[in-house]
Image (cartoon, rainbow, N blue to C red):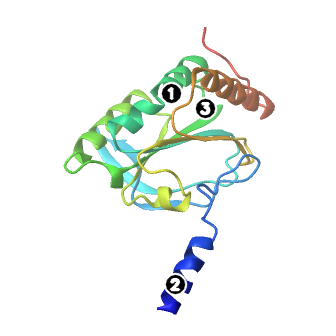
Amino acid sequence: MRLRVLLFSLTILMPLPALAEIATGGRIPDLSINDKGQLGLSDDKVVYSSWSYDQKPGKVQVVQYMAATRSASAMNKPFREKMRASLPLDGSFESISIVNLDEAMFGTSGMVISELKSSKTEFPYAVMVVDENGLGLATWELEKKSSAVIVTNEDGEVLYFKQGALSDDEIDSTIKLISDAIGKSGAEPKTAS
């Protein structure tokens, strides 16, 4: 009985792990997704290839990791729309969307893939990754059923990280941060009017 009380006391006193290993000024932990992975199109058919996060990307990156649910997708839709309207679509930065298929409601994964295929057709320059087993969620210690936005510079240093919905002010300041980072990387930031 005493041993149980002691073990229980120790588990309560143990520090909880940090919610996320990702922090401004740091780096995104390594991540490789081989089950499904990067989505591509070949003759209008979906094909997959293994995907790994590049620690030295050579260009500004905007990484979005989200649960494969409508609510998680809607969470930062205003940010994605503002990004498309305000930032250059000329390859001066890389947009990576990772969808955690492990969090999809039963029977909806086909619809999720269909939506990703449609998005890939509309935005062929964007990198879309299907994380079938939620490996990114565990590796990066992200919140479940949510959406995360991570911005890195060309050297892979995290400039911005937020889980959950961005406010209007956060959207504006993050778009400016991305644009400034593109300018510092040597690429010419062109904003849409």
**Residue occupying image coordinates x 52% and y 79%:** 8
Q: Residues within 10 Å of mark 1 (few under 14, many from 20)?
A: some
Is 75 above or below relative to 64? above
**Residue occupying image coordinates x 31% and y 45%:** 46
Q: Residues within 10 Å of mark 3 (few under 14, many from 20)?
A: few
Nearest to viewer (mark 3 / mark 1): 1
**Residue occupying image coordinates x 63% and y 21%:** 169
The mark that comes first in sequence, 3 or 1, is 1
Alpha carbon distance from label 1 to label 2: 50 Å
Let me know if residue 43 appears in the view: no
**Residue occupying image coordinates x 52% and y 91%:** 2
**Dot 3: element:** loop
* Front-most of residues 46 and 170: 170
Q: Which residue is mark 3?
A: 91
**Dot 2: element:** helix
Alpha carbon distance from label 3 to label 1: 16 Å
Nearest to viewer (mark 1 / mark 2): 2
Q: Which mark is residue 5?
A: 2
Task: Place residue 36 in its image quadrant.
Answer: bottom left
Q: Which mark is residue 2?
A: none
Residue type at tag 3: Gly
Residue type at tag 2: Val
Q: Which mark is residue 80?
A: 1
**Dot 1: element:** helix
The image quadrant where one finds the C terminus is: top right
